[in-house]
């Protein structure tokens, strides 16, 4: 990290280095061309060796030749070395410039590669995030489409079930909801919307003719009864004609018998009147008493019959009411009881299912509440993490701004204080970067937790909605089961009430029949008593006989008989004869009476038969009239009036024929048909075609739901893939933002190239330093070769004349193998390069002798000053760069 910062600073300061190097190179080149010396050269100095300083020693040794003859070749050779060293410095300076430019380019390439990598990572993150967002939007849209299609399909299914159950309004509402969903989802003119509208059209078409009238059945029953009644009328008319003919014949026979009876009765009455008035009187009194008793018995029988008739009517009315409530006159008690039991079982089952649905709903609600609480906690943590991240980023930006300001202050005024301030600002910036990274990680974790909590809330919400739906369905099913149970129980109670009413009708009918029989017997006894009373009165001759007068007449006759003593026997004989006549008359009368009775009975039977036949004929006519009235009422759509007319007719038929006669069965069939029509005037029309149309629409939306679910699954998979790509791109971007460019090989390649360029640049600087050191040594040797020889030089000749420079010009050794100067040792370089003052001090002993010799060289003060100024500029530049680096 430190090395990278140094390189970065060098890169920013590259212009100063280049300018310093170019200035130095230009100065040295000028010195070389001018052949300027920085030391005095004397002609009497020969074989002047290079002035060196032993490494690690603080004392510099100056070696000069003691010879008196100075060879120009030595100076020439030294000058050539100076020239060669100067060329080397020039080449090294050029290499520094080249490598510096290459290093700058490499650094720019690194920066460009990192910038490109950062841009690429950011672009990839943005594009993948956008793709993930788009995929999520597509998934949300597909999910919404699938949900809407499912709602439409569900509504059509509801319409199907509601229509099937006869709830056409609910079916239309459900179908309209499906149309709204389809229009919203697919457009108003789409085929899907048309498919949903077909359901409404089919239901409306059915509603135009929702039922089939049952009136035809009632009319058929009326026609059948009319035919039956007409047959009965024809049969009754035939029987009536036969009865009338028989009655007329019997009437003739009766008239003859009555005539004979009247004659016999006259004779008998005359005989009885003459014989026994007391018997006639007693017979009349007894007949009167019997007639009175018969009248009382008949009245009682009539009262009993009326009460029985009233009870029978009430029982029938109760039976009719129970039948109306039940809806039938032939209930299946076992089936009704089974329906009640099945309804109770269904209530129990739906109750258990409702309890389970309520428990599931409670559990789902608890799960949803817990997930919502976790989501709230995760949202709070996310908000805190986001705030902390923003604060950290702000702090990092603030620290960076502080660092940039400190760095600018240092550039403006390089000082130790500004350097420390810069380093402190940099440390704070690095700490702020670490804090931002930590806050970013915490934010990412909070974001992941929030997404997970949101997923849990969504799943829990969906589970809660499903539980609510199941609970509502279970509640509806339970309510329906309870209603069905109530209806079944009511129907069973109605059936039981009808059975009770029917039993009461049977009992009342039996009582009525018994009372009717008793009344008929009483009526016969009454008729007989009245006849006997009439007969007694006829025999007596009056209904209020004068018994006294009769007795007197009888007494007078007895007196006359007694008085006519002589004629007593004649009277007895006459009485005997009279008694015989009475007996004969009685016999004749009895025979006549028997004939009359027979004839009367036959006539009475004929009359009864005729009357019965006539009554039957009249009744059949009346029944036919009633049936025609019921027919007309029904034809006029007065179903209730028709039913009442038929019921009145049934009551009459039952009164005439009883309850088990075929006439009663026919009338009951008619009443039942009219009652069925009254209770159910219509039957539902066939729903098969409409249900098929609804099912066709259901199939369309089932396929749409299937396709929408498939599209939603594909969109979800695409979203998951896009989210993975976005997460991967974001991870790469996070690594890039944290200085990790491992995902971009081009950055590493650029960094490696920059490191190589830096190494080349460092080597070029080192070579330039070495070349400069060699140039300084060559100049020193040249200066030494140009100086006058020192008096002390002989003593050091053997020691120093064999000093040589070996290698590549970077190291100087003496004849003892000791290293005189090495450019690889920084401190040795600094001590080996002697200044002019130090060199003159080392050769003080040679100054006197040198001054006696003739001068062969020149001193150039301007060149020396220029060289010193250039060296000073170069040194200050290097010192400044060192300070900066």
Image (tube, rainbow, N blue to C red):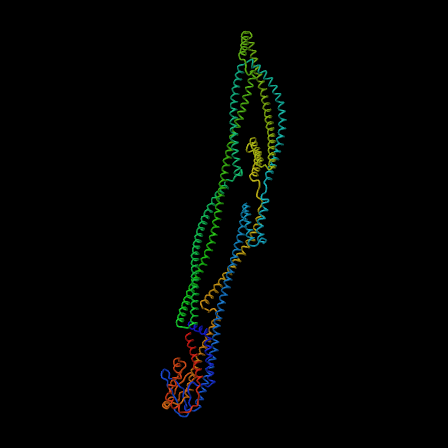
Residue 8 % position (x, y): 45, 72
Above-or-below relation of 587 to 569? below
Q: Can residue 136 be seen by looking at this rendering? A: yes
Question: Looking at this view, is 329 or 79 the one in front?
Answer: 79
Above-or-below relation of 124 to 55? above
Location of the N terminus by quadrant is: bottom left
Question: Looking at this view, is 295 or 431 the one in front?
Answer: 431
Q: Is residue 719 left or right of residue 834?
A: right
Count of numbered circles in the view: 0
Location of the C terminus by quadrant is: bottom left
Judged from this view, the residue extending furthest toward the front is: 862
Residue 227 % position (x, y): 62, 35
Above-or-below relation of 748 to 472? below
Q: Can residue 819 be seen by looking at this rendering? A: no
Question: Looking at this view, is 484 or 725 the one in front?
Answer: 725
Above-or-below relation of 99 to 64? above
Q: Is residue 586 left or right of residue 874?
A: right
Residue 558 % position (x, y): 54, 9
Residue 882 % position (x, y): 41, 76
Question: Looking at this view, is 569 or 464 the one in front?
Answer: 464
């Amino acid at each position: 990290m430190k090395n990278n910062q140094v390189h970065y600073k060098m890169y920013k300061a590259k212009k100063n280095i280049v300018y310093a190097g170019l200035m130095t190179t230009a100065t040295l080149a000028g010195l070389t061309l001018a052949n300027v010396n920085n030391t005095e050269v004397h002609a009497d100095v020969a074989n002047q060796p290079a002035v060196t300083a032993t490494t690690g020693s603080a004392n510099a040794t100056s070696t000069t030749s003691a010879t008196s003859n100075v060879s120009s070749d030595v100076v020439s050779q030294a000058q050539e070395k100076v020239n060669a060293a100067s060329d080397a410095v020039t080449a090294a300076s050029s290499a520094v410039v080249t490598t510096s430019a290459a290093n700058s380019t490499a650094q720019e390439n690194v920066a460009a590669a990192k910038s490109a990598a950062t841009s690429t990572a950011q672009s990839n993150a943005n594009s993948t995030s956008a793709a993930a967002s788009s995929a999520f939007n597509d998934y949300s849209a597909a999910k919404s489409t699938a949900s809407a299609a499912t709602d439409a399909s569900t509504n059509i299914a509801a319409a199907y079930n509601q229509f099937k159950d006869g709830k056409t309004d609910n079916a239309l509402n459900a179908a309209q909801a499906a149309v709204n969903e389809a229009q919203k989802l697919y457009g108003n003119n789409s085929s899907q919307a048309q498919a949903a509208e077909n359901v409404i059209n089919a239901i409306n078409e059915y509603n135009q003719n929702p039922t089939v009238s049952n009136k035809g059945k009632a009319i058929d029953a009326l026609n059948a009864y009319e035919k039956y009644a007409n047959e009965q009328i024809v049969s009754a008319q035939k029987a009536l004609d036969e009865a009338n003919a028989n009655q007329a014949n019997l009437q003739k026979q009766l008239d003859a018998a009555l005539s004979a009876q009247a004659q016999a009765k006259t004779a008998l009455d005359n005989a009885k009147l003459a014989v026994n008035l007391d018997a006639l009187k007693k017979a009349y009194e007894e007949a009167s008493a019997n007639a009175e008793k018969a009248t009382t018995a008949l009245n009682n029988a009539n009262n009993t019959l009326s009460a029985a008739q009233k009870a029978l009517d009430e029982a029938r009315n109760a039976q009719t009411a129970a039948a109306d409530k039940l809806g039938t006159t032939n209930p299946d008690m076992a089936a009704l009881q089974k329906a009640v039991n099945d309804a109770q079982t269904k209530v129990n089952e739906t109750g258990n299912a409702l309890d389970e649905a309520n428990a599931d709903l409670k559990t789902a609600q608890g799960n949803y509440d817990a997930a919502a609480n976790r989501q709230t906690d995760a949202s709070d943590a996310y908000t805190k993490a986001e705030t902390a991240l923003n604060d950290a980023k702000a702090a990092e930006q603030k620290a960076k701004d502080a660092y940039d300001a400190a760095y600018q202050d240092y550039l403006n005024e390089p000082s130790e204080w500004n350097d420390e301030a810069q380093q402190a600002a940099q440390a704070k910036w690095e700490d702020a970067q670490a804090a931002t990274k930590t806050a970013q990680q915490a934010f990412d974790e909070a974001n992941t937790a929030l997404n997970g909590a949101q997923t849990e809330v969504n799943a829990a919400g969906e589970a809660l909605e499903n539980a609510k739906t199941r609970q509502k369905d279970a509640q509806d099913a339970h309510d329906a089961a309870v209603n069905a149970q109530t209806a079944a129980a009511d129907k069973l109670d109605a059936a039981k009430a009808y059975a009770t009413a029917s039993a009461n009708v049977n009992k009342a009918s039996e009582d009525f029949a018994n009372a009717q029989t008793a009344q008929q017997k009483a009526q016969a006894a009454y008729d007989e008593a009245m006849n006997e009373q009439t007969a007694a009165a006829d025999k007596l001759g009056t209904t209020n006989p004068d018994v006294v007068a009769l007795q007197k007449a009888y007494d007078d006759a007895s007196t006359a008989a007694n008085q006519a003593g002589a004629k007593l026997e004649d009277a007895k004989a006459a009485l005997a004869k009279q008694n015989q006549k009475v007996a004969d008359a009685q016999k004749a009368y009895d025979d006549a009476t028997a004939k009359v009775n027979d004839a009367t009975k036959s006539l009475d039977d004929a009359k009864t038969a005729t009357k019965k036949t006539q009554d039957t004929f009249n009744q059949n006519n009346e029944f036919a009239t009633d049936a025609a009235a019921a027919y007309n009422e029904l034809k006029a759509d007065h179903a209730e009036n028709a039913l009442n007319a038929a019921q009145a007719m049934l009551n009459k038929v039952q009164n005439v024929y009883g309850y088990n006669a075929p006439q009663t069965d026919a009338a009951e069939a008619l009443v039942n048909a009219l009652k069925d029509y009254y209770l159910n005037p219509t039957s539902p029309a066939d729903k098969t075609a409409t249900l098929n149309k609804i099912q066709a629409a259901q199939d369309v939306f089932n396929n749409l739901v299937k396709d929408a679910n498939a599209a939603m699954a594909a969109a979800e998979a695409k979203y998951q893939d896009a989210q993975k790509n976005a997460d991967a791109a974001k991870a790469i971007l996070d690594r890039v933002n944290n200085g990790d460019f491992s995902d971009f090989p081009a950055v590493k390649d650029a960094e490696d190239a920059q490191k190589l360029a830096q190494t080349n640049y460092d080597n070029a600087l080192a070579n330039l330093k070495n070349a400069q050191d060699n140039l300084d040594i060559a100049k020193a040797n040249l200066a030494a070769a140009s100086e006058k020889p020192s008096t002390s030089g002989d003593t050091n000749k053997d020691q120093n004349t064999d000093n040589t420079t070996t290698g590549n010009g970077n190291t100087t050794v003496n004849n003892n193998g000791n290293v005189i100067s090495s450019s690889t040792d920084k401190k040795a370089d600094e001590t080996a390069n002697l200044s002019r003052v130090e060199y003159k001090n080392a050769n003080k002993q040679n100054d006197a002798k040198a001054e006696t010799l003739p001068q062969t060289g020149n001193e150039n003060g301007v060149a020396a000053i220029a060289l010193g100024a250039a060296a000073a500029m170069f040194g200050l530049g290097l010192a400044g760069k060192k300070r900066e680096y």
